[in-house]
């Protein structure tokens, strides 16, 4: 049985090294004396702060990044490779986030290349998928999720699936304080499981953890994670508040 997983995506926050150090102080304080038997906790800061996080070596905290580039090295100004991330000591990488699709034009082909680089370099991937409000309204949720899964997971061998967590992040729930009902998450979960079963043997597909992301708070952890029996959550804004973030992790670990 894989552990559950709570991932904090700090996005482009906080705004300075000083503030990040303060954040780490608070996180360390919140985690003091707490044990997490069944849950991994991952923090994905902006890459410039990654080493600060790793140097603290906070008990129960693993480090990840929010993106990687697919090439190994070379003339790719501004990019960071999965190998670099691995060698720095991080163990997770988010890939395919809807904000990267929106602002940087990432599509399934690009996400697939990045995912392959992540796995090749021995990192764990958190692959984000999700429909827009418009697509949901038009009844296209199932079709969209299937297309994203097929494209993103193209040529990924079954043996690699245990290193991938799928985060179902409906775009309309990201940063909006709107959350799906437990039933809607359960429906998405079934769509995802069915799509995966078409692509792989069920036994291999079941090795992937399935997370929910989008406006997760401690007061809705039950609705978005525990009720629909998801394997964890991907947290945005609330992960910037150590007290709330740790509260979410405790709730998930204890249930
Ligand atoms: P919020 O939790 O701020 O809605 O962000 C969700 C998200 O995009 C996590 O990756």
Image (cartoon, rainbow, N blue to C red):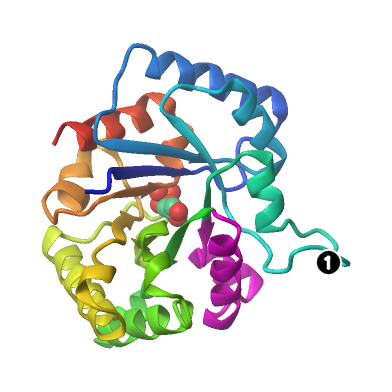
State which quarter of the image contains the C terminus: top left
Nearer-the-camera pick, 160 or 40? 160
Give the left or right position of residue 198, taking residue 22 as reference. left
Give the left or right position of residue 100, taking residue 31 as reference. right
Residue at the image position 44 percent from the left and 13 percent from the top: 29
Q: Position of residue 195 (x, y in %)?
A: 26, 81
- Magenta residue check for 101: yes
Quadrant hosting residue 132? bottom left
Name the residue furthest right: 75
Q: Is 179 situated above or below 41?
A: below
Q: Which residue is mark 1?
A: 76
Majority SS type along the magenta span: helix
Q: Is 231 situated above or below 75?
A: above
Nearer-the-camera pick, 4 or 29? 4
Tell me where the magenta segment starts and ends, as one range: 94-122
Residue at the image position 21 percent from the left and 77 percent from the top: 191
Nearer-the-camera pick, 61 or 22? 61
- Magenta residue check for 15: no
Quadrant hosting residue 168? bottom left
Q: Position of residue 229 (x, y in %)?
A: 14, 53
């Amino acid at each position: 049985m894989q552990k559950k997983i709570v991932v904090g995506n700090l996005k482009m926050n906080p705004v300075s090294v000083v503030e990040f150090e303060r954040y780490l102080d608070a996180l360390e304080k919140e985690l003091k004396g707490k044990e997490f038997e069944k849950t991994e906790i991952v923090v994905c800061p902006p890459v410039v702060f990654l080493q600060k996080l790793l140097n603290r070596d906070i008990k129960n905290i693993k480090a990840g990044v929010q993106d990687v580039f697919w090439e190994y090295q070379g003339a790719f100004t501004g990019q960071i490779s999965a190998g670099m991330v691995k060698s720095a000591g991080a163990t997770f990488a988010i890939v395919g986030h809807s904000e990267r699709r929106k602002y940087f034009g990432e599509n399934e082909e690009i996400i697939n290349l990045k995912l392959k680089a992540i796995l090749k370099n021995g990192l764990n991937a958190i692959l984000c998928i999700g429909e827009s409000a418009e697509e949901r309204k038009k009844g296209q949720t199932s079709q969209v999720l299937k297309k994203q899964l097929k494209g993103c997971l193209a040529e990924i061998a079954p043996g690699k699936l245990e290193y991938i967590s799928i985060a179902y992040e409906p775009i309309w729930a990201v940063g909006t304080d709107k959350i799906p009902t437990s039933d809607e998450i359960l429906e998405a979960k079934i769509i995802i499981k069915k799509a995966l079963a078409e692509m792989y043997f069920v036994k291999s597909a079941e090795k992937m953890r399935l997370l929910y992301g989008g406006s997760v708070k401690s007061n809705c952890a039950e609705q978005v994670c525990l009720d629909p029996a998801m394997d964890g959550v991907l947290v945005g804004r609330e992960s910037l508040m150590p007290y709330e973030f740790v509260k979410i992790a405790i709730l998930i670990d204890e249930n």
